[in-house]
Image (tube, helix red, strand yellow):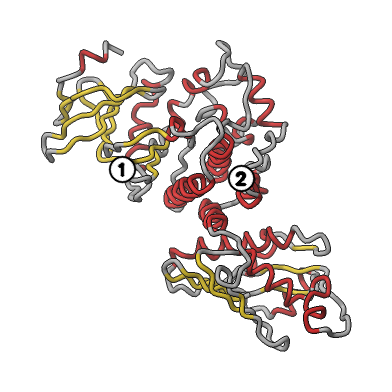
Amino acid sequence: MADTDSLIGKTFSHYRILEKLGGGGMGEVYRARDEHLKRDVAFKILLRDSQGAAEAGEKLLSEARAASALNHPHICIIHEVGEAGGHHFIVMELVEGKPLNSLIPSEGLRQELVVRYGAQIAAALAHAHDRGIIHRDIKTANIVITSSGQVKVLDFGLARFYGGREIEETTRSNQPAIDANAIAGTLPYIAPEILRGEEADARSDIWSLGVALYEMSAGRRPFCGQTSFELTSKILREPHPPFPAQVPPGLRAVIEHCLEKEPGHRYQRAGEVRAALEAVHTPRATTPSTVPVSVTPPSSAKRSLWIPGAIAIAVLAAVLFAANVGGMRDKVFHRASAPGIHSLAVLPLENLSGDPQQQYFADGMTEELTTELSQVRSLRVVSRTSVMRYKGTKKSVPEIARELNVDAVVEGSVEREGDRVRITA
């Protein structure tokens, strides 16, 4: 590409270049003035000498046009894509802020910041995934934090055409041991299945989000290597290093679920990650003022609770009480011991909010409750995948229990209103 300083003051279409903001594997980014709408924008000129860029130019612009349909507060909006003066360009919302990677101290960010930023990134991914767009290059350098503390995710859907350059830039090897043309993304954040040659999907973005969450929490990436071969081997085969002591168990569990090597074992939807992080965000205290749990007489099959945020652990306590696991209920009421529950299934919680957009939250709470119950050694809990086929089913609970071969079934609903959630299990 020509000397970038020579572009200052030039006009492409109706955009006048003002100053250079940065550059990367895809091209150079400038602040430009939109002379039609009288506003400043981010103007990305794509590198013409990038490997394969000449052949991929039109495909990239087509991908950018699809991404321009995204409209979400945590996604950097694409205003226009086009070509002028022999250059392909993308015009984007000008985001004033700092890259997330520049804000992470060596000891990691505070938990509340990890959860806040992570939930916003997950919300952005959920919006894009619901519209068939995969990011393919989620990393802390592609996430900007504004002065008000809001997340903006950059470069949606654009990585696969220019990802090869990032492979070499993120390792110390001059000869990467993997085919950079075959994959897209930045190597330390690439999911194992992509390195195995499989197609990227939403779960690949969730892996990358898990890497970013780990990096935010620990102050370092989970997988590192002196060469791309060593790094690839660790991503494919080795567990992540232990978390620092200050990372709480709830947040660890969410990150570990994102970093499952097999995509089928991860969260399946970004909305589930967001819901799990929101549950972590609320302090899991047990004082009545924080987690009011109303226990009705033992003949009642339901436990209702109002919680600020979404405290799945409180629901877990109610379910364990109702199921009489470990004789909990009998001990409370001083009754003779009765046969306990040794296996159960958690049916998808029904969304009673009247807002289809809240379905992700109900699904996330189902996932969280299933995960929490699975930690009880005396219980065999049927996987969420096995019970999803009963979502909206007309079958009776006894029928479902027989088909799943369980002693009990947990069913319930989620009703969210503002910052308050009513969960009945």
- The quadrant in which residue 19 appears is top left
What secondary structure is found at the residue carrying circle 1? Answer: loop
Task: Report the residue at 33% width, 47% height from top.
Answer: 69
| Residue designated by label 1 | 77
Task: Report the residue at 27% width, 37% height from top.
Answer: 94
Residue density around tag 2, few if under 14, some if 14–19, many if 20 or more, within 10 Å = many
Q: Is residue 152 above or below residue 348?
A: above
| Residue designated by label 2 | 255
Relative to 347, 83 lies left or right: left
Task: Identify the mark nearer the N-term, 1 or 2.
Answer: 1
Comparing 256 with 134, the one in front is 256
Measured as percent of width and height from the top left, residue 342 is found at 83, 69
Comparing 350 with 339, the one in front is 339
> Residue flagged by tag 2: what amino acid is it?
Ile
> Residue flagged by tag 1: what amino acid is it?
Ile
Measured as percent of width and height from the top left, residue 395 is found at 67, 78
What secondary structure is found at the residue carrying circle 2? Answer: helix
Measured as percent of width and height from the top left, residue 38 is found at 12, 38
Q: Is residue 322 above or below residue 78?
A: below
Q: Is residue 301 above or below residue 422?
A: below
